[in-house]
Image: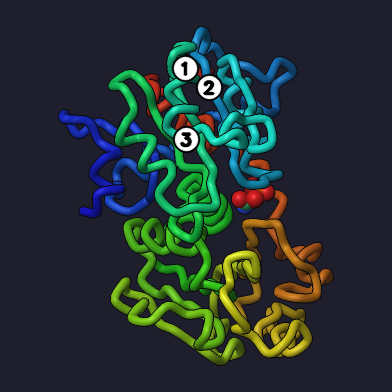
Amino acid sequence: MTPEASVQFDANGRLRHFLTTEGIGRDTLIEILDVAGSFISVGERRIKKVPLLHGKTVVNLFFEPSTRTRTTFEIAAKRLSADVINMNATRLSTTKGESVLDTVKTLEAMHTDMFVVRDKASGTAHLIAEHAPRNVSIINAGDGRHAHPTQAMLDMFTIRQRKGAFEPLAVAITGDILHSRVARSQIHALRQLGVSDLRLIGPATLLPTEIEKLGVRTFFNMDEGVEGADVLIMLRLQTERMDGQLLPGPEEYFRYYGLTERRLKRARPDAIVMHPGPMNRGLEIASSVADGPQSVILAQVTNGIAVRMAIMAKLLGEAGREGQQ
Ligand code: CP
């Protein structure tokens, strides 16, 4: 197990932090999905609140921009009745030279129970977890190109919600795999949950070398890669993480790797289309597909609240039974 994967567990093997989907067993992944399922109804009630984390303090520590993740974490914590503080890079003393660890220690001195951390550098959440006191939990809300485990879990939830069992599915992930923390976390989770036909599609410059070791098949030709697939996951071109020119140009990228209605017809007729967002219409996905009947992109966002509630409840030691009331 990698250092990131092992630091997630306490001496008794209990999940204490959520930093990566790597090393988390199938039973724990399924338990999170089941508890998230019980929380879906909370969002549909007149009073959208359960008291599970009443009296707990959660700090959202975002050093990198976010719309979906930051907002759904805030809503999730509030639905669990926690007190939530939102900190973003422009409001933090790290802009005055304070180290991230000193910022976190300062916030810990205010009896924070959980930090939700996003940073453009890989490893920030892991570093904070390594230095956290025993009673503080860390959730990785995306670190560089390394991992985005709660995004992967909400994607797993959405796949199971629409498709049922994982084992018979053909799942195709298309685009900038090389720079994608989402793809990395999805691959570990999909493999652990038993998906046998896992395909990565993209230009050679955006597919990591030796990625096949993770039990995936790679395709440079998108038409071949999407053939008969049940789930199509599109990824954003992460130009902010690219060193140098890795692509000929946006029009050419869309021609070869954009998901169009014509390409979608090559997948199974009941295939679902996913995208973690933010998406670039006309670059990785056509608007008619993003807004079409097979798209579950907005359902992913909605499901993110219940999934993040389940993960927070698990880390802070609650069973999540309240969601079933
Ligand atoms: N999927 C995702 O992480 O989106 P945000 O950057 O908006 O949080």
Alpha carbon separation for disc pair 1 and 2: 6 Å
Comparing 46 with 279, the one in front is 279
Q: Write the residue at 39% across / 35% down.
A: 128
Compare marks 2 and 3 and give the one earlier in the sequence.
2
Q: SS of the residue at dot 1?
A: loop
Q: Say if 220 sits above or below 315 in the image.
A: below
* Label pair 1/2, CB-CB below 8 angstroms: yes
* Label pair 2/3, CB-CB below 8 angstroms: no
Q: SS of the residue at dot 3?
A: loop
Comparing 184 with 156, the one in front is 184
Alpha carbon separation for disc pair 2 and 3: 20 Å
Alpha carbon separation for disc pair 3 and 1: 18 Å
The label on residue 112 is 1
Image quarter for residue 91?
A: top right
The label on residue 58 is 2
Compare marks 3 and 1 and give the one earlier in the sequence.
3
Residue under label 3? 99
The label on residue 1 is none
Indicate which label's residue lies in the foreground, 2 or 3: 3
Q: Write the residue at 35% across / 63% down.
A: 191
Q: Amino acid at mark 2?
A: Val
Dot 1, crowdedness within 10 Å: few (<14), some or many (≥20)? many
* Label pair 3/1, CB-CB below 8 angstroms: no
Q: Say if 318 sits above or below 215 in the image.
A: above
Count the marks: 3
Dot 3, crowdedness within 10 Å: few (<14), some or many (≥20)? few
Q: Residue furthest top?
A: 55
In the image, is the residue at mark 1 within 8 Å of ligand 1 by its beta carbon?
no
Q: Write the residue at 74% across / 18% down.
A: 46
